[in-house]
Image (cartoon, grey):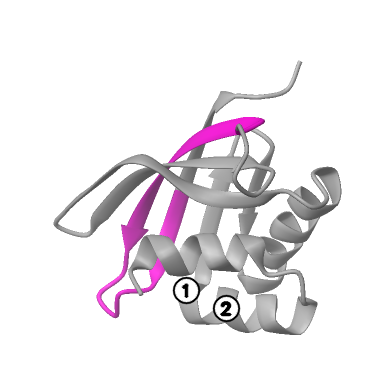
Amino acid sequence: MTIIERYLAAWNETDAELRAKAVAELWTEDGVYTDPLANVTGHEAIAAVIAGAQQMFPGLVFTAGPLDDAHTNLVRFTWHLGPAGGEPIVVGFDVLDLAEDGRIRKTLGFLDKVPA
């Protein structure tokens, strides 16, 4: 499973314990997550942002968008949030800065399409 697949799986994980485990495996202890709605540091805070997104958009799932690219320690990709198999309601673009051990040191998120 690629880092993007693991990342999206963490965002889709509805079980709080499994989500916390996924976040700990993906991000460094001092990992940062920043987007237009959040700027947090650490596993607990990142897991809380994910839980908040799930509460805001219940029943919707994150899927990979058409773009992904990587070089050196950076990964960029688009993602969609919407009903399984349906049109996305939210579309975003994330950049991951990876640490030496392959975990995420920093996530920079951008929202390209949001509900009105």
Residue 40 in percent (x, y) is at 64, 54
Asked if 9 appears above or below 114 in the picture, the reply is: below
Label number found at residue 59: none
Secondary structure of the residue carrying tag 1 is helix
Label number found at residue 22: 2
Mark 2–mark 1 CB contact (< 8 Å)? yes
Q: Looking at the picture, which amino acid does disc 1 mark? A: Leu
Magenta stretch contains residue 94: yes
Q: Looking at the picture, which amino acid does disc 2 mark? A: Ala
Magenta part of the protein: which range? 88-107
* Residue 69 located left or right of residue 1: left
Q: Residue furthest top?
A: 116
Residue 108 in percent (x, y) is at 46, 44
Q: Residue at x 65, y 52 (%)?
A: 61
Q: Which residue is mark 1?
A: 26
Q: Residue at x 73, y 22 (%)?
A: 115
Residue 114 in percent (x, y) is at 66, 24
Query: Splitting the image into 4 quarters, where does residue 41 fall?
Result: bottom right
Residue density around tag 1, few if under 14, some if 14–19, many if 20 or more, within 10 Å: many
Secondary structure of the residue carrying tag 2 is helix
Q: Residue at x 70, y 58 (%)?
A: 50
